[in-house]
Image (cartoon, helix red, strand yellow):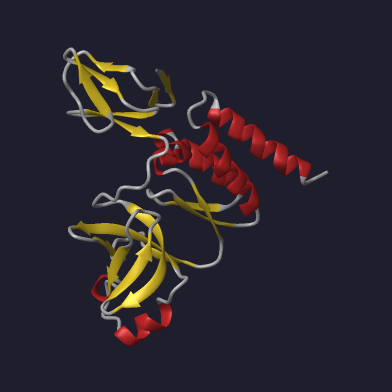
Amino acid sequence: MEEKQGYVIVTPGTLLATLKKSGEGTFILNGKTYSKYFGIKREGYRISVIPFNQSYKPKRGDKIIGKIKDFNYPFFIIDIEAPNPAYLHLMDISRYNTRQEQIMKIYKPGLWIYSEVSELSDRVRLSMKFRESKILSGGRIAYISPSKVPRVVGKGGSMIKMIQDKTKCKVLIGQNGIVWINGDNTGLVIKIIQKIDKEAHISGLTDRVSQLIDRELNYGKT
């Protein structure tokens, strides 16, 4: 078990607690709680482990990035890189009195959006009415395992701030593992995202990412 930058990375069979505090990704043996997976430990009333290769499981309040795939009145069908698509109702798009005809001119298949999971029932329902929701125009898209999103953000937002400050790119991370990047160094940021995805479990990640950025930017000047 390794603790780095506020995250505890565990392997299968790691002792998590000497009590029964079993949550997702754990098991109980002789009254103690152990990890089932290689992943990140989450501790609260119960202890859970998020495996590094886990697909996205929507939770209410998640801020995610998705792509409009189709329209089936009155819902837009959104690909959110989960086992099932999400749905965006026409009434959940604008906080203002926007006419349906205006919405249909803007929201078309292929459009990327940053939205919020507002409801979980027989389907995942999204909303564009939270303050930071937006249409994502231009830029490029990258992907990372959802369990590794906290490593891209970093403790207190330290990693993502460093990436944005050094590359001068705007980076928006969905909790579903989709990343939108806009700026002059999008290719470099994609390379950084891929590196974090592969090396999230190895200590010294922030330093390696910083060195990669410096090396790539300096190489471009020679």
Front residue (pair 175, 31):
31
Determine whether 61 is above or below 206 in the image. below
Determine whether 79 is above or below 160 in the image. below
Q: How far across and how far down the image is residue 129, in percent?
A: 28, 65
Does residue 188 appear left or right of residue 222 in this picture? left
Front residue (pair 196, 137):
196
Does residue 98 appear left or right of residue 146 in this picture? left
Residue at the spot x=23%, y=61% of the render? Answer: 123
Q: How far across and how far down the image is residue 213, in percent?
A: 65, 39
Determine whether 70 is above or below 102 in the image. above
Residue at the spot x=35%, y=80% of the render? Answer: 103
Residue 70 occupies which quadrant of the picture?
Answer: bottom left
Residue 116 occupies which quadrant of the picture?
Answer: bottom left
Which quarter of the rendered picture does the C terminus lie within? top right
Q: How far across and how far down the image is residue 18, in percent?
A: 21, 13
Which quarter of the rendered picture does the N terminus lie within? top left
Numbered-mark total: 0
Residue at the spot x=41%, y=20% of the render? Answer: 3
Determine whether 22 is above or below 57 in the image. above
**Residue closest to the far right:** 222
Q: How far across and how far down the image is residue 113, in percent?
A: 41, 64
